Structure formats: structure tokens, C-alpha cells
Image: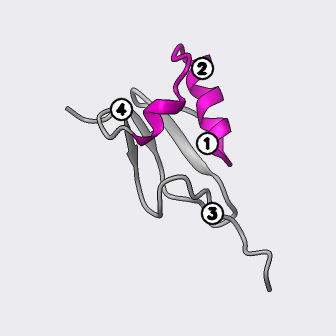
Amino acid sequence: MAARIVIQEPSPTGGRRVRADGQILGLAHSDRDVVEFLRRAGLPDAEPLLDDPAWVEWRGGQPHDYGGPSLSA
């Protein structure tokens, strides 16, 4: 069974698109954003699910890395 929640690869400007059951929930810039999107979608207390591959598929990049331009130039 595929994960219900997909967190896409980081965009070049930062953030990851979050989908649940195929529906776009928003552009997250942190785990906190993802948890809030999932709460609004009816999944309270979703934070423990972020590291559960049965629930969440992290695509591209490292899990919990939301990318964005480097500030150390």
C-alpha cells in the first residue's frame, strides 16, 4: 500500500509541496507546517507519523529538509 501522505522534493526557493490522498495541502517550510496541514485535513496529532513510511513518503532530498537558498554565501 502506498503512503497516504507524500512530501515532494524541496523546491529551489525552499519548501516542499504536501499531498494527502492525492490532494495538495500546501507548501511546507517546516515539519510544523506539515503537521498543521494534516491537522486541517483531519489528522490530529500527526507529528509521530512524519517518520512512519507506512504513512509518509518523503520524495527527493533528506526527510525534514525543506531546502531553500543558502544563507552562508
Density class for disc 2 (Cα within 10 Å; few <14, some 14-19, many ≥20) is some
Q: Is residue 56 above or below residue 38?
A: below
Mark 3 and mark 4: span between their CA atoms? 22 Å
User: Considering the image in quadrants, where does the C terminus appear?
Assistant: bottom right
Choose the circle earlier in sequence order: 4 or 1: 1
**Residue 71 left/right relative to 3:** right
Q: Position of residue 33 (x, y in %)?
A: 67, 37
Label 3, label 1: how many angstroms apart (C-alpha)? 12 Å
Mark 3 vs mark 1: in front: 1
Q: Spatial distance from mark 3 to mark 2, Cα to Cα?
A: 23 Å
- Identify the secondary structure beneath mark 1: helix
Identity, as a three-letter code, of the amino acid under mark 3: Gly
**Coordinates of residue 72 in the picture (x, y in percent):** 79, 81
- Disc 1 target residue: 31
Residue hosting label 3: 67
CA gap between label 4 and label 2 equals 14 Å
Residue at 19% in and 32% down? 1
